[in-house]
Image (spheres, grey):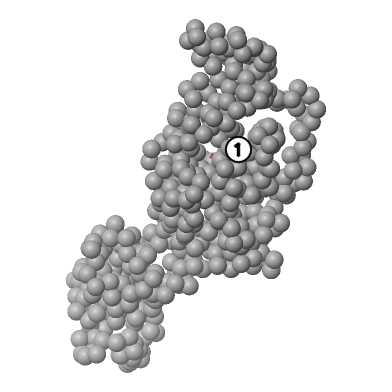
Amino acid sequence: MRFAPSPTGYLHIGSARTALYNWLMAKKEKGLFLLRIEDTDRSRYVPEAMTDIMENLRWLGLDWDEGPEAGGPAGPYYQSERVEIYRRHAEDLVVQGKAYYCFCSPERLEELRRSGYGYDGHCRELSAERCREYFEEGKEAVIRFKMPREGKITVRDYLRGEILFDLQTLDDFVLLKSDGFPTYHLAVVVDDHLMAITHVLRGDEWIASTPRHILLYKAFGWEPPVFIHLPVLLAPDGKGKLSKRHGSTSLREYREQGYLPEAVNNFLLLLGWHPPDDREVVTMEEAAAVFSPERINTAPVAFSLEKLNWLNGVYIRRLAPEDLAARVLPFLQKDGLLPDPCPPERFAYLVRIIPLVQERLRLLSEIGEQTAYFFQEEIPAPSPELLVGKKSSASETRDLLAAALKVLEGVADFSAANVEETLRGLAAELGKKPGLLFMPLRVAITGRTATPGLFETMEAIGKPRVLRRIRAALSGLA
Ligand code: GLU
């Protein structure tokens, strides 16, 4: 199996699905998964794309058995370093009369393009002698494939069955450009053969190219691989292809927003495939054991951010506190809530508060928003409106907070259980509903009305800071 991205931009979420399916099938069949960089289109080459693609494949855990950095027997794995190989193969076809040199000028080709027809075969019958003369005159040439002029060609797609293409609709396409670089068609066929690819699993936008590929395999006398084309990815509304207009399309954006690779993989897996038992939560280990291309759908599939968000929550809740702490750490550092590097005692503190927020967290990037008050020495003073609930008054709130401050000062062991017992005792003594006491305390200590359990939160923040914050809130109400 292979994943063969062109480094023309950041790794696209749809391409990541292609890579994942290839990787899973290699795992399931105990095959090899290789990464090949299709970088022969110099005009579309984006240097950062290379590092981005490899970094994000690794982030997803889609390691390659052969390819850049990994090496392997069929390298090099950058097509730009294989130009000689393609040239040799194209020239072989010329010698065999299956391809030919074309000297047509760019102007002539432009005119043909505008007329709406493909290449008209103008140079198809040039003699070897004439070609030599042209070369001697310093003329530049491309090499074109000699398409059979009539009949049909059958493409067998593993999922769709046989697809017939009329040969009249296919022109003599270019194999080698005048700068010596191959076209995609030549390079992909030569490499898939030389790299011993048995199954080509790729996006369905390549179906239209497949008849050319099959004819090339025939011309070289090679056995074509099995072709499996994935369904189109649609925008969330199901109308039209997924594109930038619908939000993030690059994997790096999802990573920066705080999605877990486990959730992204699970999500991508279900975009066109489903397990035999129709489960929604499928880990990569589970998928690698049961993945089969028969279960890939051909119907276009819509991208649903809701599902991704839901899965992210599922995988966040599955993580051990230490693991989740390690994953949210960079986000807290970015928000300036923890130092970088993070000293062990601060990290241990983070691990301690993780169970308090793990249940609610949807995206890792929300962590700062949800936990800032645990890390700050002082919190911004909550407004009196927030402190004084709708069912209370400023003076009542002040009295309650003052009474709470007093009893809490006397709590020596500031555990959640002790704090709870003390505060419930106080409410009973004052003949107040506990909620009337707990809400202003919560706001005073955290600055917000929705938090994890109040007593656990107080224990984690610790007595000195809790008392300071209650005093600060009291002075705000004075
Ligand atoms: N380089 C092509 C791409 O960027 C690969 C297509 C294929 O898998 O044949 O998608």
Q: Residues within 10 Å of mark 1 (few under 14, many from 20)?
A: many
Q: Quadrant of residue 328?
A: bottom left
Which type of secondary structure does the marked residue at label 1 adopt?
A: helix
Q: Position of residue 322 (x, y in %)?
A: 36, 73
Q: Is residue 242 above or below residue 336?
A: above
Considering only vertical position in the picture, is 196 above or below 330? Answer: above
Determine the residue positioned at 22% across, 70% down. Answer: 343
Quarter holding ligand 1: top right
Q: At x 61% / y 67%, what residue is drawn?
A: 289
What residue is at 42 percent from the left and 41 percent from the top? 49
Examine the rendering and report whether any part of residue 306 can be seen: no
Q: Residue furthest right?
A: 151
In this rendering, position of residue 142 left or right of residue 376: right
Spot occupied by residue 423 in the image (x, y as percentages of width and height): 32, 87
The answer to whether the residue bearing label 1 lies less than 8 angstroms from the nearest atom of ligand 1 is no
Q: Nearer the viewer, residue 32 or 160?
A: 32
Give the amino acid at mark 1: Val
Q: Position of residue 144 (x, y in %)?
A: 61, 22
Count numbered badges in the picture: 1
Residue 398 image-quadrant placement: bottom left
Q: Is residue 52 above or below residue 140?
A: below
Spot occupied by residue 464 in the image (x, y as percentages of width and height): 19, 79
* Residue behind mark 1: 189
Residue 318 seen in this snapshot? yes
Q: Residue at x 72, y 49 (%)?
A: 158
Q: Quadrant of the C terminus?
A: bottom left
